[in-house]
Image: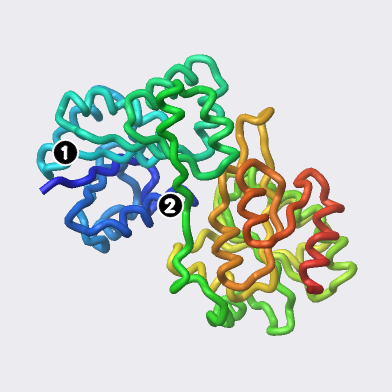
Amino acid sequence: MSRTLVVTNDFPPRLGGIENFVFSLCEAMPADDVVVYTARMVGSKAVDRAVAYPVVRDRAKMLLPTRRVARAVAAVARTYGCDRVIFGAAAPLGLLARGLRRAGIRHVMAITHGHEVWWARVPGARQALRRIGDDADLVTYVSRFCRDQIAPAMSPAARARMQPLSPSVDGSRFHPGVDGSGWRRRLHLDPETRVVLSASRLVRRKGQDVLIKAWPRVVAAEPLAHLVIVGDGPSGRRLRRLARGSGVGHAITFAPSVAWEDMPAVYAMAEVFVLPCRTRLWGLEPEAFGIVFLEAAASGLPVVGGASGGASEVVDRVGGVIVDPRSSRAWSSAVLAAIRR
């Protein structure tokens, strides 16, 4: 029996859009057909016990395409009878493909996300990405924007093999009518409070600082408006400091990251979903897709998103509003319009 080996750094318990994407891809395959090889992290054992397929954890916290990892991946492929490999993120682990073919792997799929955009532009990394494309039977892309950015780094043959593979939303999990009152009670929000939700990692690319800067104007026009920022990340301390100095800190609440299975109730407590994602580092760091926009829309929320990369495609698809992520004034106007719909 042939199996698929998914080689990835992006797997629970690590949280994030790519992690959810890869996890959902694995969950959609028959349990007897998939094996996961991933990094070791805190909370791994609970995740691995909960899934129906084997998960093999490397001793490292981050997989790199080293000789040791190549030997370990090849050994797992032999042990479980895997003849197909999916790289959960093409770069850099896709550099293992050539050696895995010599070990008997017949088919290789490399999934690209947003970070391959900078690989496609930076000398050295660009050549490595070209090799990954040549060594894979199929290279996927999550948005038209990402394809347009990544394809020029590929050889003509690899470009011809590129196909779309975007995250999708489980409509049985994300839908209107979920009870969000428990989250309102947990965050001490009254039933009449107009909750505006922003959920993502707390990193500069997500633009939560623009929301905080916009919030005094929002509260001045809508006193019952309350911003809830859900997530963790390196920008957390900076954002909390910005909120304390905004003059409307009483109308801004921070909550830690929430497990994916609990997110429907988080969306359900809100009236509007917002995320001012933006492109950084001279175009090297865009927002590739934005699964949260699809989840929020499926949950019945109006969506407001930043104009960045593939996120604009997603927001437009769900009938949301795309706003300049550099302008806090534009964001206050957009949020107020969404609240008053």
Vertical placement of residue 238 versus 252, above or below: above
Please name the residue that numbered disc 2 is placed on.
21
Give the numbered dot on residue 271: none
x and y percent of residue 46 in the render? 28, 60
Q: Earlier in the sequence, mark 2 or mark 1?
A: 2
Q: Residue at x 81, y 60 (%)?
A: 334
Q: Quadrant location of residue 197?
A: bottom right
Measured as percent of width and height from the top left, residue 220 is found at: 89, 67
What residue does disc 1 label? Answer: 77
Position of residue 238 measured from the top left corner of the image (x, y, whole percent): 68, 46
Q: Residue at x 65, y 70 (%)?
A: 301
**Which amino acid type is shown beneath numbered disc 1?**
Ala
> In which quadrant of the rendered image does the C terminus lie?
bottom right
Q: Quadrant of residue 104?
A: top left
* Mark 2 residue element: helix
Distance from Cα at disc 2 to Cα at disc 1: 22 Å
SS under mark 1: helix
